[in-house]
Image (cartoon, rainbow, N blue to C red):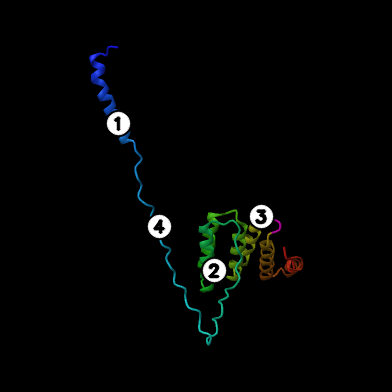
Amino acid sequence: MKTSRFASRALPLVLFLTGFIAGCTTTPTLPPPVVERPTRTAVPPPPPIDEPAPEPVVEPTRPALDDASDATVALVNQAYRDQDGGEPTRAVGNLERAIRIEPRNGQLWVLLAELQLTAGRATPAEQSARKGLLFLARLSPFRRRAWLVIASALDARGETDEAAAIRAEWGNYRG
């Protein structure tokens, strides 16, 4: 068997390249994984036995809003702070801003009606409460609140018979 000159020269080159490529394809060694040590958190010491535990601060109950946006909740909370701070006009303004964000939220309309009533504005309070009733679910506890605002507004206008009838129906209602 006779080999060509090309084959005799190419054989060592092919063997060299095969060995070189095989040496280059080895898997690289990875560095060992880094293990983090858990950090210890400081535990506050228990209160001394001699001192009585502080009384919890109980805030007045405020109704929770169903499905309200974060901006609306923030405005309602600000309205509560304004009302508690003796600024009912500013509180009404914040609730009106919340209603511009969510005009179909009946709960906001009822809260606005309650604030308007405490500010001595009976007619707008009744209107806001009636508008809130349009958007409230049938079993919402806010329905009772809306009707009681309407009754108080009617009382303020001198329509005591109609107000008494509303209170008789909604006074003990627990939705």
Q: Nearer the viewer, residue 131 or 6?
A: 6
Sequence-wise, which precedes: disc 4 or disc 2? 4
Residue on which disc 3 sits: 134
Label 3, label 4: how far apart the Cα atoms are: 61 Å
- Which residue is disc 4 drawn over? 35
> Residue at label 2?
80
Examine the rendered structure and indicate whether residue 20 appears above or below residue 170.
Answer: above
Single out the residue that lies furthest toward the top: 2
Residue for badge 1 = 19
What residue is rendered at 54% in x and 63% in y? 76
Indicate left or right for 14 with 132 as reference. left
**Helix, strand or loop: magenta stretch:** loop
Provide residue 121's location: percent of width, then percent of height: 59, 67
Of tags 4 and 1, which is closer to the observer? 1
Amino acid at pointer 4: Val
Q: Amino acid at mark 1?
A: Gly
Disc nearer the start of the sequence (4/1) = 1
The tag earlier along the polypeptide, 1 or 3, is 1
Indicate the amino acid at tag 2: Tyr
Spatial separation of the CA atoms under disc 2 and disc 3:
24 Å
Q: Is residue 136 magenta?
A: yes
Kind of residue sitting beneath label 3: Leu
If the image is split into quadrants, where does the C terminus sit? bottom right
Crowdedness of circle 4 by 10 Å Cα count: few (<14), some, many (20+)?
few
